[in-house]
Structures are given as structure tokens and as C-alpha cells.
Amino acid sequence: MEKKWSIRLIRFAAIFGLIGTVIGSKMSGNMDYSLRPIHAHILLVGWLSVFAWGIFYKVYTVKYKKLVSIHAITAMLGAVGLTFGMWMYNLNPFNLDETFVMIFFIVGGTLLLLAFALFVVITFLTEDKN
């Protein structure tokens, strides 16, 4: 289970890495840094954290396999929800209701927070390979 989710998380992180660097390149080229917080969160959450989780699952075996799936799904939904919600909150390009946008942003961030908390638990539930 860990190996399957490992590559999924790493691929997901790679997509976020590409999106984050494209946004950074665009900001630099335009000398417009209004997307800086979104760019930073895409790279820190979507690229760095998700990549680290993917590597963790490649290296370690978790006792309770179902937690791996729950964590990975929550992490990916949280990363998308937080960064997309942050983008909509800051720019609101679709002129959506402000309350809806704020709730979307908060739900994404909460899912990501749950993913981090679940990961802490998972680190204590690894099998000893010795």
C-alpha cells in the first residue's frame, strides 16, 4: 500500500512543483509579485510536504495500511483546497460569493491540517525493519 501511494504522492508533488515554478517565473518576468503567498504555499505544501510524505512511504512500512490511503487522500485534497482556495480568496477571478470562497479556503486548510496531524500519528505506527 505504501509503495502505491508513494509514487502517487511524488507525481502529485511534481505537478505542484511545476505549477509553483511557472507562477514564480511569471511573477519574476512581469515584476508583479501579487501571487507570492500562493506561489509559496504551492511550493511548500504541494511540492515539499507532499514529496516528503511520498518518500516516507517509500522508505517505511506502516502497520495500519488504511491510514496510508486516508492520509494521502486528505493530503492531496488539502493541498489543492488550500492553494486553490487561497488563489480564489485573494483574486476571486470567477466573482463567486465571498462566503463560499472563504469556506472553500478554510475547508482546504483544515483538510491539510488533518493530514499533518494524521502523519504525526502514522510516524509512530511504523513497523520495525530490524
Image: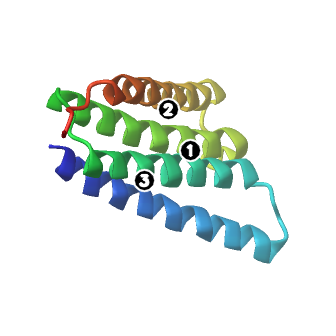
Residue that appears at 47% across and 42% down = 79
In the rendered image, the residue lying farthest to the bottom is 29
Separation of marks 2 and 3 at Cα, in angstroms: 18 Å
Separation of marks 1 and 2 at Cα, in angstroms: 8 Å
The residue pinned by badge 2 equals: 108
The circle on residue 83 is 1
Give the secondary structure at mark 2: helix
Does residue 2 lie above or below 26 as drawn? Answer: above
Q: Earlier in the sequence, mark 1 or mark 2?
A: 1
Image x and y of residue 128, in percent = 21, 33
In this view, the residue in front, 114 or 64, is: 64
Q: Amino acid at mark 3?
A: Phe
Give the secondary structure at mark 3: helix
Image x and y of residue 25, in percent = 69, 73
Give the secondary structure at mark 1: helix
The circle on residue 51 is 3
In this view, the residue in front, 104 or 93, is: 104
Q: Is residue 114 left or right of residue 95?
A: left
Q: Earlier in the sequence, mark 1 or mark 3?
A: 3
For label 3, the crowd category at 10 Å Cα-Cα, with few meaning under 14, some 14 to 19 and many 20 or more, is many
- Residue 95 shows up from this direction: no
